[in-house]
Image (cartoon, rainbow, N blue to C red):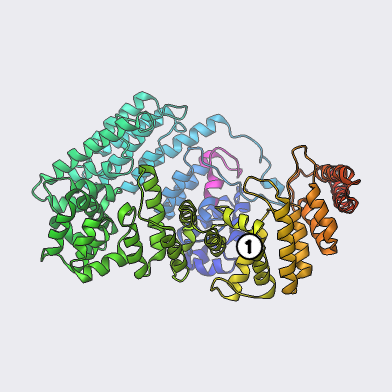
Amino acid sequence: MIDNLDRDSSSLLRAFNSDSSDLLWALEVLAWSEEYFDDAIECLALLAANRTDDKQRGNRSGESLSAILCGWANFTTVSSGKKLAALDSVKRMSSSVGWDLLFALWPDWTTITPTYTPRFRADWCPLTDAPVLQRDWIEYRHGLVERALSWSGMTASNLERLINHINRGVMPEDRAQIIDYLSELALSTEYNDDDRYLVWRTVRELAAKHSHHRAEWSLPEEEVDCLLELSDRWKPTSPVLRHLYLFNHDPGLLDCALHRDIDDYDQKVEARRQEALKEILSMPQKVDNLEVLASRAVASWVLGQMLADRQELNFWDIAYWVDSSDSKLTAVVDGYLYRALRQRGASWLQDVLDDPRLSASQRAAVLRCVPAEWDYWEVVARNQDDDSAYWQTAEMRVLSPDHMQYAIERLVACGRAWDAIDSVSLSIRSAKQEGVKTDLTADVLIGLLHIACTQESAKISSLSYEVGQVVDHIVELNANQVDVARLEILFYRLIGDYREPTVLHHTLATEPYLFVRLMEVAHRGETMLGMDRSASFRIAMSALNGWRGCPGMTTDGELDAVVMQRWVDGVRQGLAAAELSDIGDYEIGSLLANSPEDEEGAWPLPAVCALIDEVGSRNLDEGFIAGMCRGLMSSVRGVYDGGQQEHESAQRYRALSRQIRLTSRHTARLLKKAADRYEKRAVEEDDQAEARQDAL
């Protein structure tokens, strides 16, 4: 097998399943034996060095190695010394695998998945549960540190990993030895400025972490001071690299903790960023140095905005970054333009657009960042091409309250109705917070939503909240209730899970024609609101299934018996004309089961009982029973709880049946039938719970 791995590892792996778990398990079993330990380790090392699939799922050879050789558990019968010798052997076969394995074995409270154990050779693992002796664990940790400081191939990335593994799990004397080693290595000339920056940044981050968070896992304060001294020795000579950490989202200042005083922290970060930019921009090669900073900074947008505030730099110094393939450079330009346009006004925009140095790509970048305000729109409108490009590409956020209708009209004309909805929703919230009125009308917003249904957009599914906000604002503008209900139907599948369609539900409870229409679409294949048959069916069914109200219900939760009677008569008449009487009566009965109680808890109300008795429909009766038994469709209970829930529901409906038996015998029998169904389910759940108990 070893010979085959040396020649062609891929052919051997193909002999096993896709993730080679069978092979790894076999080698893990062999590693329990002292006789086959060395061969198993060699095979696993060769597999790790010749992996053919970086996306391999399941077990990995490196994980098997780290489990077998870990020092705090026994997954082999060999001694700690032999485990360390095996680690040296792996390093000789593959330097990269050796270094990866060293840090995987490092004492840092990582978890290890136990290896596969022998099923037939119990003599190979007689001490599976035997604890590792403390002296062996200490010796093992010393051995790991010794190898980290003596192995060849100590690259900057390995130094970074070594620093990140300095923790309480490492013996104090070993931590001191590591810091001394790094201090001596700082004098070496084999590391370039980028390498020194990597080590310096890592040491700073480690020192900040243990300095700001004093806990059991934190390093002693004197060791943190040693880390600070160590960071000074690795500080890069380049001012750009020295200041680069400041342009992360959290620079990790050593003298100020973010979690202690966020305002003081932000002020210090801002001040030091400004000092850093002042130093960089005062250098002869300021643009070149700035490009290095921008290409490596994490907070690109923040850097761009800060550059817009600097007098030492103008837009034309960095305008060529727009054409860069580096997304960080383009993000810096966007941040610059965003701040500059808002600070310098529409006149600066006009000067930039009129400048002959402006290329086509730079013009497009400028137009994307133009604020959504009238003064800027007037400047853009001077050139037809600019005007068209702006409305087709600009990212609209908060719109001017006095010109929202104009913005909607322009965006809709460019096929961006969904972008308009996004901006209008944000603008409505902003106007409410500021207490200002907008020029929006209900008709404009209703028209926008209807047009949006005819346009495609990749962001439709993410705008459910925004559409709901627009519909709510339409309601606030006292729009016609029928128009609002139509919108709530049209967008039901988009906003139904996030916003209750209150107007639709109120209309359904009071207007028979709407319920009849939805039933016709759901059960006769008709269409509505300009949608095809499939879309009409889905929305109609969603609206009907989502309504858990009762005919005649008012907005304050009371039942109007006159409206309920008129509604039922109108619906039954309309559904009879549509040849949907049977299913219609069933649905009516199901809805009547949602009727409210009176103040004393009596249910159903006399008006509901009288209606059920008067109609005398078997389908309505069955629908009423089904509505009462919705609790049988799904429930949450413990494994051994049995049918307690159903017993309680059965008792409730029997008690209610007795209360109305003298005034409405027919409805009382329906309640008793519902109680019988709950009781039947309760017995079934009791039997299942008892069977589970007996199986223990």
265 sits left or right of 140 in the view = left
- In the rendered image, residue 625 lying in the magenta stretch gets the answer no
Question: Which range is magenta?
Answer: 64-82
82 sits left or right of 279 in the view = right
**Quadrant of the image occupied by residue 204:** top left
Q: Which one is in front, 516 or 175?
A: 516
- Please tell me whether residue 422 is drawn above or below residue 17 in the rendered image: above
Task: Provide the residue designation for mark 1.
Answer: 542
- In the rendered image, residue 69 lying in the magenta stretch gets the answer yes
How many residues crowd mark 1 within 10 Å: few (<14), some (14–19), many (20+)? Answer: some
Q: Residue at x 53, y 52 (%)?
A: 41
Query: What percent of the width, then of the height, locates residue 272?
Result: 22, 36
Residue 187 shows up from this direction? no
Q: Could you tell me which quadrant the N terminus lies in?
A: bottom right
- Please tell me whether residue 270 is drawn above or below residue 322 in the rendered image: above
User: Circle 1 sits in a helix, a strand or a loop, which is it?
Assistant: helix
37 sits left or right of 589 in the view = left
Q: Residue at x 66, y 64 (%)?
A: 515
Q: Which one is in front, 284 or 663?
A: 663
Query: What percent of the width, then of the height, locates residue 207?
Result: 34, 33
Query: What percent of the width, then of the height, locates residue 115?
Result: 61, 49
463 sits left or right of 194 in the view = right
Q: Which one is in front, 309 or 540?
A: 540
Residue 456 shows up from this direction? yes
Query: What percent of the width, then of the height, locates residue 97?
Result: 44, 53
Q: Could you tell me which quadrant the C terminus lies in?
A: top right
Q: Residue at x 30, y 44 (%)?
A: 248
Q: Amino acid at mark 1?
A: Ser
